[in-house]
Every structure is written in structure tokens, then in C-alpha cells.
């Protein structure tokens, strides 16, 4: 009986620790918390030059979470950031995994 209880506790701790919501866009995977931080940065971005794209401004921002640096190196960074902004706008739906881009719910 003790063994069953120990196995149950270990399983429960594993499920709780691995239950973070992930957002997937193509080959990129991000935590929902990072996407929310990205949204905060995007809301604060004010373009000083019409020649500079919002993705270039975001990528130049030192506060950009590290997991988005790979997006900055890709050719479709602007589109990825745009889709992530949509996810962040509806983060409550993502948290219950009702959005196809979100995974990892338990």
C-alpha cells in the first residue's frame, strides 16, 4: 500500500510540474508566460521611424525574452510575432487549451 501511495505522489508531482502551457507556432515553441511578456513589450513599442518594422524594434529590445531570439533570426519574424500577439490577447482561452496553438494542459 505504501508503494502505491509513493507512486501516486511521484506521478502527481510530475504532472503538476510538467503542466505548463506551451504555445506552438511552426517550429517555434514558447511558454505562455513568455508570450504574455512579449505582448507587454509589443504594447510598449512605439516606432520612431516608419522604415523600421515592429519586429526589428522588438528584436533590438534587450528586455525581449531569450526564447524569442530564434524568431528574430527567421525570415517571418513579423508574422510570428503577430500570431503570438493574437494568442496573448486571448491568453485565458489558451490557458484552458481551447486554442489549437496551445498545448500542455493537464
Image (spheres, rainbow, N blue to C red):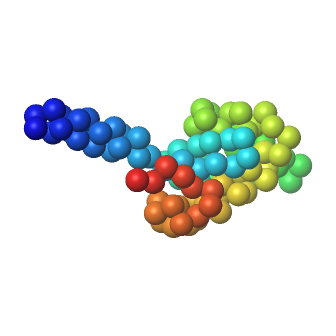
96 versus 24 height, above or below: below
For the point 41% across and 41% down, the residue is 18
* Count of numbered marks: 0
**Looking at the picture, how far across and down is residue 56, in whole percent?**
78, 42
For the point 68% across and 33% down, the residue is 69
Q: Residue furthest right?
A: 51
- In the rendered image, the quadrant that contains the N terminus is top left
Of residues 106 and 92, the one nearer the viewer is 106
Q: Residue furthest front?
A: 1
Question: Is residue 8 at all visible to an observer of this figure?
Answer: yes
Of residues 4 and 63, the one nearer the viewer is 4
For the point 69% across and 49% down, the residue is 25
In this rendering, would 75 be left or right of 82? right
**Looking at the picture, how far across and down is residue 33, in whole percent?**
49, 48
Question: Is residue 64 at all visible to an observer of this figure?
Answer: no
For the point 47% across and 60% down, the residue is 95
Of residues 73 and 21, the one nearer the viewer is 21
**Looking at the picture, how far across and down is residue 75, in whole percent?**
85, 40
**Looking at the picture, how far across and down is residue 44, in whole percent?**
61, 54
Q: Residue furthest left?
A: 1
102 versus 9 height, above or below: below
Amino acid at each position: 500500500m505504501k508503494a502505491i501511495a509513493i507512486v501516486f505522489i511521484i506521478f502527481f508531482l510530475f504532472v503538476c510540474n510538467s503542466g505548463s502551457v506551451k504555445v506552438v507556432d511552426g517550429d517555434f515553441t514558447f511558454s505562455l508566460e513568455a508570450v504574455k511578456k512579449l505582448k507587454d513589450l509589443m504594447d510598449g513599442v512605439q516606432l520612431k521611424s516608419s522604415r523600421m518594422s515592429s519586429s526589428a524594434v522588438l528584436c533590438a529590445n534587450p528586455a525581449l525574452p531569450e526564447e524569442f531570439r530564434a524568431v528574430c533570426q527567421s525570415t517571418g519574424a513579423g508574422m510570428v510575432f503577430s500570431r503570438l500577439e493574437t494568442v496573448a490577447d486571448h491568453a485565458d482561452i489558451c490557458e484552458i487549451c481551447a486554442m489549437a496553438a496551445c498545448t500542455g494542459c493537464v
